[in-house]
Image (cartoon, helix red, strand yellow):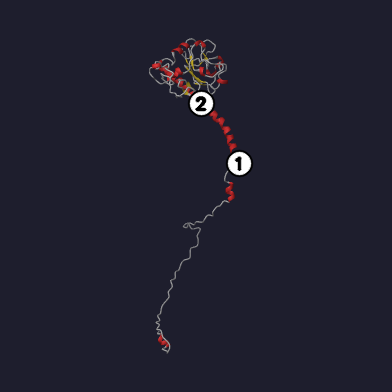
Amino acid sequence: MSADAKFGNSPGRRLIAVDWQDCEWRPRIEVRRPPPLLDFHSPRRNFIFPKPMKSNPPHSRRHRAGFTLVELLTVIAIIGILAALLLPVLAAVKRHALMVKAHLEAADIATAIQGYDSAYGRFPVSSAAQKAASVVNGDFTYGTNGLASATFNLANPPALGYDANNSEVVAILMDQTNYPNGAGWTINTNYQKNPQQTIFLNAKMSGDTSSPGVGTDLVYRDPWGNPYVITMDLNYNEMCVDAFYGKDAVSGGGLNGLTHDPGVAAPDNWAFRGKVMVWSAGPDGKIDATTPANQGANKDNVSNWK
């Protein structure tokens, strides 16, 4: 419809032509589905529920910061008691382990001597020892002169006129021609005692003259630093009489399985039925020729035959 037709042309009026058109307002309408209800029993849905935060009150953290003085002293006391209980046990275990080691080393020495005897038909001794043995019972003992004892200083009776440590035997068995400490030639000079140059004994070298093992003086010492004592049946009667264990006061009654040697007149003829006796004075390093073998200073001795 035209605006002129409706209002006409009146004087003093200014008409503005307006063109009317039909139009439509179509707003966009979206239809959204409401969210589904939570199904706590559905296996297809996993729900994450927030965990409440834990917080420790300040006084709780301060309480757990460390031990109190009483608690610390209690722990120290407990540790001290346990240590006091364990130390004797550890000492006993160590003592037993060293005694086992000494027994094995004594057995190794005896085996090496018997191996030498099988190879050469004689024992690894010097001519001086062989001559001294023939003065009495035909056997010779090396080594007890280095042991601590108030009543027994020399291994062999003074009538023998010769006493020695075990270095002569070790030099032959280990095929040593010179002393490592520069003391000169050994009894095995130019391999005269071991011409086949066979090493019958493998023992650890200690590097000095007091530690366990074979020292620079070729003395074989037990785990406590004392020399091993070696006795050999130089008259080959299968009865070995040791200068210490042969005594009535030590082995009387057949202690340690020893018996009387029928070829030697009493007294002091207790013998081991075999060719070699090797023993150690044990942890205390002492022997006593007036005390039975199972008592006093002799109780802890270690040997290859028992």
Q: Where does residue 157 sit, x and y in percent of width and height?
A: 52, 12
Task: Give the residue furthest to the left.
Answer: 196
**Residue at 41% across / 87% down in the picture?**
5
Identify the residue position indicated by label 2 in the image: 98
Q: Where does residue 170 sit, x and y in percent of width and height?
A: 44, 19
Estimate how packed mark 2 is, as few (under 14), some (14 to 19) or many (20 or more) residues with alpha carbons within 10 Å: some
Task: Give the amino acid type for the residue marked by disc 2 in the picture.
Answer: Leu
Task: Give the residue furthest to the front.
Answer: 12
**Residue at 58% across / 37% down in the picture?**
76
**Residue at 46% across / 18% down in the picture?**
167
Estimate how packed mark 1 is, as few (under 14), some (14 to 19) or many (20 or more) residues with alpha carbons within 10 Å: few
Residue 106 appears in view: no
Task: Give the amino acid type for the residue marked by disc 1 in the picture.
Answer: Leu
Quarter of the view holding residue 288: top right
Q: Is residue 44 above or below residue 220?
A: below
Q: Quadrant of the N terminus?
A: bottom left
Of the pair 190 and 272, the residue shown nearer to us: 190
User: Which element type, helix, strand or loop, lies under badge 1?
Assistant: helix
Q: Is residue 29 above or below residue 50?
A: below
Among the two numbered marks 1 and 2 on one chain, the one whose residue lies closer to the N terminus: 1
| The label number, if any, that marks residue 69 in the structure image | 1
Q: Is residue 12 above or below residue 229?
A: below
Q: Where does residue 163 sit, x and y in percent of width and height?
A: 49, 14
| The label number, if any, that marks residue 128 in the structure image | none
